[in-house]
């Protein structure tokens, strides 16, 4: 599916039961029979493509990057991703997390796709993935991002690492909000969450916002391009609209940190906007790109 459809980047979670099935062969491979980056199948065949990691790992903030190509800490992209972490936690008023996020950067798309198709055959073909895997039932999760060096790596890493940062501090993240925040923060920092393509598409396509409908979605397969765009729009309204709407979102995020169910956001937003749909439509109608001068695109080549 084309990247622009926006349902190619789920914050994917594996249930503990499914995890045991997926990793059944891996336990054999880690027991000393074969290399650590291989799976020994029941038939005794070494089958799994290798993960990147020939070069020393690079730690940036709470992210650890693995690559076959040498990486340098002062790469502008890495510096920006460290800033993303600080920006998110500050703007969303969330406590910093020490949870390590492992990021595997494949040298090319072919190697990435071969690995993902073998390792996670249940997943569709996508350009990048964030995967949260429970170590034990009810226990902490391993947070992992997979992607490859390419033209979209800046956008992809910002999107997937937003998922990882959210899941490192929140007990639960509703699907629409998870993707809406990832769409918001995938934009370069100078755009302040603005996505021109999303805004223009929503304004031209007879958009009828409905947060109640959006909150009913609980499967990534239900998220198409319109749902990703609408999720972004609601987040933009709350973070870049009125101070009162921002408070609603910040309080909701705090509720998502706790053990109790946070419920739905729509009823809370109606206390600020009697008709949230009209408020969002009006927000989009007057939305303009940020006036700040755009910075040069950061250098994306690994090791420079």
Image: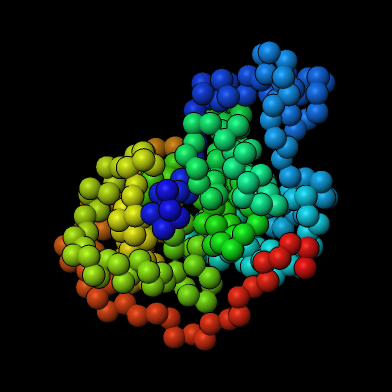
Q: How many marks?
A: 0
Tell me which residue sits at (30%, 67%) in the image. 201
Residue 35 % position (x, y): 80, 28
Tell me which residue sits at (25%, 70%) in the image. 203
Q: Is residue 158 visible?
A: no
Residue 135 % position (x, y): 61, 29
Closer to the camera, 240 or 225?
A: 225
Left or right position of 3 against 51: left
Tell me which residue sits at (82%, 50%) in the image. 55
Tell me which residue sits at (62%, 50%) in the image. 109
From what the image shows, is residue 194 above or below residue 247? below
Closer to the camera, 254 or 201?
A: 201
User: The C terminus is located in which quarter?
Assistant: bottom right
Residue 163 % position (x, y): 51, 50
Closer to the camera, 294 or 122?
A: 122
Left or right position of 60 against 276: right
Q: Is residue 201 visible?
A: yes
């Amino acid at each position: 599916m084309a990247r622009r459809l926006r349902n190619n980047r789920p914050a994917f979670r594996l249930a503990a039961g499914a995890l045991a099935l997926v990793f059944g062969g891996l336990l054999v491979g880690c027991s000393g029979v074969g290399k650590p980056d291989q799976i020994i199948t029941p038939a005794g065949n070494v089958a799994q493509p290798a993960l990147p990691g020939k070069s020393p790992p690079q730690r940036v903030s709470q992210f650890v990057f693995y690559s076959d190509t040498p990486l340098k800490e002062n790469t502008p992209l890495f510096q920006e991703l460290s800033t993303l972490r600080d920006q998110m936690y500050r703007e969303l008023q969330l406590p910093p997390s020490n949870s390590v996020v492992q990021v595997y950067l494949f040298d090319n798309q072919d190697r990435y796709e071969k690995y993902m198709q073998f390792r996670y055959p249940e997943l569709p073909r996508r350009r990048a993935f964030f995967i949260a895997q429970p170590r034990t039932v009810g226990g902490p999760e391993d947070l992992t991002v997979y992607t490859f060096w390419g033209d979209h790596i800046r956008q992809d890493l910002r999107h997937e690492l937003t998922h990882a940062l959210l899941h490192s501090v929140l007990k639960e993240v509703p699907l629409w909000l998870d993707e809406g925040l990832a769409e918001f923060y995938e934009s370069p920092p100078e755009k302040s969450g603005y996505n021109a393509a999303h805004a223009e598409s929503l304004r031209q396509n007879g958009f009828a916002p409905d947060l109640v409908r959006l909150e009913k979605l609980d499967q990534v397969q239900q998220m198409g391009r319109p749902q990703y765009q609408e999720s972004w729009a609601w987040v933009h309204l709350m973070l870049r609209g009125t101070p009162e709407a921002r408070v609603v979102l910040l309080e909701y995020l705090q509720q998502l940190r706790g053990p109790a169910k946070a419920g739905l956001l729509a009823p809370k937003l109606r206390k600020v906007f009697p008709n949230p749909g009209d408020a969002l439509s009006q927000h989009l109608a007057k939305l303009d790109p940020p006036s700040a001068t755009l910075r040069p695109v950061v250098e994306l080549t690994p090791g420079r």
